Amino acid sequence: MRSSSVNSSKSDHIICGVVARISDKFGWSRFWTRIISAILIIMNPVFGLLTYFVLAWLLSKYDE
């Protein structure tokens, strides 16, 4: 059984680990969470990427 902690290993991160952390926190499948996030980014690249990198920045501040 997978742990639902926010801290996941660095090997699970593809770019910044935002999707891996969100999927771990809510107990979702990482595969489907990544697919849905990729679709959302493709549908609206500016908003999707901006949201992604803001979340990456906030999550890095949360870890400190």
Image (spheres, helix red, strand yellow):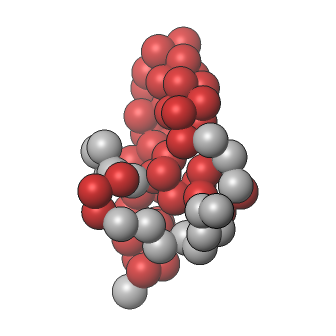
Q: Position of residue 52 (x, y in %)?
A: 45, 43
The quadrant of the rendering that contains the N terminus is bottom right
Q: Position of residue 35 (x, y in %)?
A: 53, 25
Q: Position of residue 3 (x, y in %)?
A: 60, 69
Q: Nearer the viewer, residue 23 or 61?
A: 23
Q: Nearer the viewer, residue 13 or 40?
A: 13
Snapshot quadrant of residue 57: bottom left
* Residue 3 seen in render: yes
Q: Nearer the viewer, residue 52 or 5?
A: 5
Count of marks placed on residues:
0
Residue pictured at 64% horizontal, 68% vertical: 4
Q: Looking at the image, is 17 positioned above or below residue 2?
A: above
Residue pictured at 29% horizontal, 63% vertical: 10
Residue pictured at 60% horizontal, 62% vertical: 2
Check the image and name the residue furthest to the bottom: 64
Q: Looking at the image, is 58 positioned above or below residue 62?
A: above
Taking the image as shown, residue 16 lies to the left or right of residue 2, namely left
Check the image and name the residue furthest to the front: 1
* Residue 44 seen in render: no
The quadrant of the rendering that contains the C terminus is bottom left
Taking the image as shown, residue 58 lies to the left or right of residue 1, namely left
